[in-house]
Image: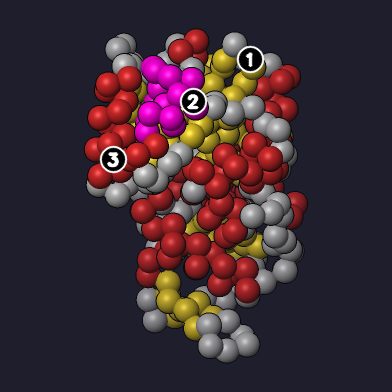
Amino acid sequence: MKIAILSRNRSLYSTRRLVEACEQRGHEVHVIDTLRCYMNIASNSPEIHYKGENLVGFDAIIPRIGASITFYGTAVVRQFEMMGVFSVNESVAITRARDKLRSLQLLSRKGIGLPITGFAHSPDDIQDLIKMVGGTPLVIKLLEGTQGIGVVLAETRKAAESVIEAFLGLNANIMVQEFIKEAGGADIRCFVVDGKVIAAMKRQAAEGEFRSNLHRGGTPELVKITPQERATAVKAAQVMGLNVAGVDLLRSDRGPLVMEVNSSPGLEGIEKSTGKDIAGMIVSFIERNAKPNRTRTKGKG
Ligand code: ADP
Ligand code: MG
């Protein structure tokens, strides 16, 4: 097959591993810089051009769209879909997953366990918003944040009020969330491919830090997940309409709670901690599913 990896940087671990996995399985693989694609939509035969060439003959794409280029990146994925090219994750699902509020609303509609979460626009409603999520300590998050940046733990009501006020004053979109203390600074990353959890790791935050992101000094560890955690991760990926997803869970006293669902989960931490060939499993998923015009819109919203 002829497979394109949409990635801005071919030297990233995830990109390199996907290239390797494609080649090992005898496929022709191209790494394409998403932002260098330009498109012709004013015709009934959609095209994508790349550095002066017309991209033709691809059977599948693996979108690795960074959070900072979601808007343009999903437009490129959509264009491939219009050309009938199979995408590992469809554009609508990527867009859905990038909006934390929209994701939580969709997940809650399907009864998936979530931390109590509130959001507001007006600073006048801060007091009540804090009450709504059960008071302090609480977590305040920028909706567009990634890698732990823009996630703040406010331990007292005064601290919560001033941080929320400051964010709203900057016109930032935020949500306010119950702090799951019993998670002990750890979360569980479940790597879902094609409706199955194929690998899982626990990420433990560094000493004195509550955010377990590997970029914030968290350490990946092997973990055995419970059947309930497995089922929750599978359901969350399904509701989001993602074939490949990194579902992050917090272990709470009332069971697993979904914190977020990632549409371009990194491969490095999970492959190194589990020793599994995740890239190979993604390519094998493509082999089983990439037929022309096979990308369907799954889920709603
Ligand atoms: P990002 O998209 O920046 O990774 P997350 O929502 O995943 O933002 O939060 C980053 C980290 O902060 C999580 O991995 C988790 O360790 C911690 N965290 C986030 N929300 C909560 C919460 N409600 N309770 C406890 N810890 C949390
Ligand atoms: Mg996260």
| Residue toward you, 143 or 216 | 143
**Mark 1 element type:** loop
Please report the bounds of the magenta region as a residue range: 126-140
Which amino acid type corresponds to the residue marked 1 in the rendered image? Arg
At 30% across and 28% down in the image, what residue appears?
161
Crowd tier of the residue under label 2, counting other residues whose Cα lies within 10 Å: few below 14, some 14–19, many 20 or above = many
Q: Position of residue 100 (x, y in %)?
A: 49, 43
Exactly how many numbered labels are in the figure?
Answer: 3
Q: For ligand 1, tell me if the residue under mark 3 lies within 8 Å.
A: no
Label 3 element class: helix
Name the N-terminal-most of marks 2 and 1. Answer: 2
In the image, which disc is placed on residue 133? 2
Q: Is residue 289 left or right of residue 78?
A: right
Let me know if residue 212 appears in the view.
no
- Left or right for 73, reference 164: right
Image-quadrant location for residue 225: top right
Q: Position of residue 121 (x, y in %)?
A: 39, 46
Residue neighbourhood size for the residue with mark 3, other residues' Cα within 10 Å, grouped as few (<14), some (14–19), many (≥20): some
The residue at 47%/59% (across/down) is: 6
In the image, residue 222 above or below residue 133: above
Which of discs 1 and 3 lies nearer the camera? The answer is 3
Q: Residue at x 54, y 21 (%)?
A: 250
Q: Is residue 284 magenta?
A: no
Mark 2 vs 3, N-terminal side: 2
Q: Which mark is residue 167?
A: 3
Q: Is residue 127 magenta?
A: yes
Spatial CA distance of label 2 from label 3 is: 18 Å
Where is mark 1, residue-wise? 254
